[in-house]
Amino acid sequence: MERDYIRLDYWTSDRSLVVDFVFWDRGARGWRIYIISQIDYQGRNCSSHAAHWLHDNGDSYPYICWAGNIETLEQAKSVASLWAECTARYIRSRQSFDDIADQLKDQFGWEDDYYYTDLRR
C-alpha cells in the first residue's frame, strides 16, 4: 500500500535559505521528513552527526534526524521548520547545531504555515 506524501518548500524567517522537503506518512511509524534540497554548508561540517540528518540505504535523499515518533503532519512541519532555521543559523555562525536548536526550539511551530510554499501532492 502506497502512503501519502506532501512536498513543501520552506523559507527561513530571514529568507537566507529555502529547503525543499517531502513529508512521508509511514502510517503507525509516523512521519519522515526528507530533505530534497542540496544544502550549501559553506565550509561548515556537513556530516550527518553535525547537521542532524540521516540516510538509509536505498533512499535517494537524506531525512531529518529526530528522536521519537512524529505522529502528525503538523508535528512534522514543526520539526522541519526548526531544522531549517537551525541549519540557516548553523551555516552563518560558529555555534553548534545543538546549541542553536536549544535556543530556537520554542520559537517555530506548525502554526507558522506562512513560511511554507508550493504545496504539491
Image (tube, helix red, strand yellow):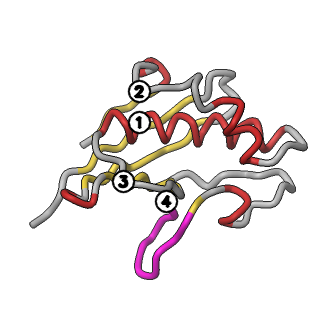
Q: Which residue carries the number 2 mark?
A: 110
The mark found on residue 69 in the picture is 3
**Snapshot quadrant of residue 51:** bottom right
Residues at circles 2 and 1 in contact by the CB criterion of under 8 Å: yes
Q: Which residue carries the number 4 mark?
A: 63
Q: Which residue carries the number 1 mark?
A: 77
Residue 121 position (above or below residue 60): above
Q: Label 1 crowding class (10 Å Cα cut-off): few <14, some 14-19, many 20+?
A: many
Q: Amino acid at mark 1?
A: Lys
Q: Secondary structure at mark 3?
A: loop
Q: Earlier in the sequence, mark 2 or mark 1?
A: 1
| Residue 74 image point, x, y percent | 33, 33
- Say which residue appears at 69% left-offset and 22% top-offset: 14
Q: Amino acid at mark 3?
A: Asn
**Snapshot quadrant of residue 100:** top right
| Residue 44 image point, x, y percent | 84, 55
| Residue 40 image point, x, y percent | 73, 51
Q: Earlier in the sequence, mark 1 or mark 3?
A: 3
- Say which residue appears at 45% left-offset and 46% top-offset: 21
Q: Earlier in the sequence, mark 2 or mark 4?
A: 4
Which numbered disc, 2 or 3, marks the residue closer to the eye? 3
